[in-house]
Amino acid sequence: IDREEPNYFGAGPALLPTSVLQQAGKDLINYDNLGIGAGEISHRSKAGVGIIEQTKASLKELLSIPDTHEVFFLQGGGTTGFSSIVTNLTAAHVKKHHKAGTPYYVIDGTWSKKSYEEAERLGFDPKVIVNTKEIDGKFGTIPPTEKWNIPEDLSDVSFVYYCDNETVNGVEFRTFPFDKFPGVEIAADMSSNFLSKPVDVSKYGLIFAGAQKNVGVSGISIYIIKKSLLEQAPAEELRKLGLQVTPIAFDYPTVVKNNSAYNTIPTFTVHIVNLVLKDLIAKGGLEAQEKENIAKSDLLYSTLDKYPAIYKLPVEKSVRSRMNIVFTIEGSGLEDKFLKEAEQSKLEGLKGHRSVGGMRASLYNAVTLKSTKLLCELIEKFAKEHQ
Ligand code: PLP
């Protein structure tokens, strides 16, 4: 099985290394010489459990996950996390304090806003620490924490939620921003920058990521949770407090107790994740990957910055995403023309998210420096012709 090496900048589902997919293709038909494929074996068989165990082990190795934390997989994507995080982490807070507490949200773009709205919809009365759109009208900035609305009494905070990389808006946190929240559990959506850089897992209560960007294909999400957050109040206590109980398939303690196979986990999808993880380990781990991601995004940003008359970048330099580079092109009809020329050069997936328009080049782990250079060549050529 083969393909011409794609130059694909789509935001998700996104590009995966061809060699990984070639192996996955073989394993879909005949996994580990069993005579049947990884999507056909039982999730409770030796081979099925082996896939889950190996994937967890690879992840623990790559991210140096401490013993205080547990890894598990859930069906569904990022949106599944929006509802399951608020129900599970509230249940953990109730277990400890016998009251609901209040979830707090940093709204730094489209996806954290959706997550906040889901908490509201489920009746949790979440509060906003900062909504960056209220500052610049476009989610293009992250103010210093001195300007955040941090509650004085942190004991009532059930957790703080934020999105580490906002895929639609192209904003990314450069550093861990919650040093002013001692003792508070931090929940991070890392769907679009997971495994793009090393992360100190010990600082988080929970990290989650839909697999379909840097880690695999759609259908599964990855969770890393502090083990103490698996201690949760029983359904009766939650009901008495008028709180939404977590549906069983998304109940983290139940999923962990059953080693991610309480119900039928998509074993083949988990296996693809493991192949991606092994590939990352073989290529030198997350430090090496981060270096490459910095080189790619620096090159693209510096090329765009050379032509400020034609390319506009809505995000402040200090918080520009290394994964999703968003820009607009000044001039009537020029964005369509750019996309057409890109397609002619076999540079695909550059149209911005439908909610914001413009262009978006996603430089996930599997996008090569070579592809990035080809895109930069087009950006240079187009600017010289049109500015
Ligand atoms: N969180 C982030 C950062 C995302 O980029 C996305 C989707 O692109 C989501 C959540 C939602 O993911 P899903 O479509 O898998 O529900």
Image (cartoon, grey):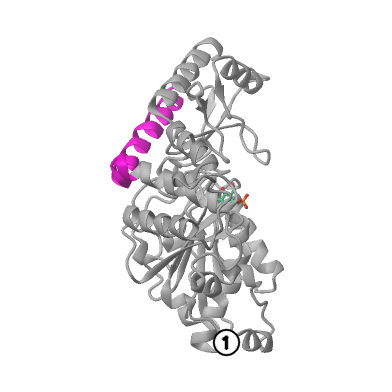
Main SS class of the magenta portion in the image: helix
In the depicted structure, whether residue 103 falls above or below residue 165:
below
Mark 1: C-beta under 8 Å from nearest atom of ligand 1:
no
The image quadrant of residue 105 is bottom right
For the residue pair 47 and 224, the one nearer the viewer reads as 47
- Front-most of residues 128 and 4: 4
Q: In x, y percent, where is residue 92?
A: 52, 79
Residue 361 versus residue 382 in the image, above or below: below
Residue 219 vs 240, above or below: the answer is above
Amino acid carrying label 1: it is Lys
Residue appearing at x 41%, y 29% in the figure = 368
> Which image quarter: residue 56?
bottom left
Q: Residue furthest front?
A: 35
The image shows residue 269 at horizontal and vertical percentages of 54, 49
| Range shown magenta | 281-307
Residue 304 visible to an observer of this rendering: yes
| Helix, strand or loop at mark 1 | loop
Is residue 196 or residue 219 the one in the foreground? 219
Q: In x, y percent, where is residue 327?
A: 54, 32
> Residue at image x 43%, y 58%?
50
State the residue in front, 2 or 115. 2
Name the quarter where the C terminus is drawn: top right
Q: Residues within 10 Å of mark 1 (few under 14, many from 20)?
A: some
Q: What residue does disc 1 label?
A: 99
Apparent side of residue 284 relative to residue 342 in the rendered image (left or right): left
Q: Is residue 215 visible?
A: no
**Residue at image location 50% in from the left, 40% down from the top:** 315
Q: Up-down: is 226 above or below 201? A: below
Residue 34: image location, x then y, percent? 48, 48
Is-magenta flag for residue 5?
no
**Number of callouts in the render?**
1
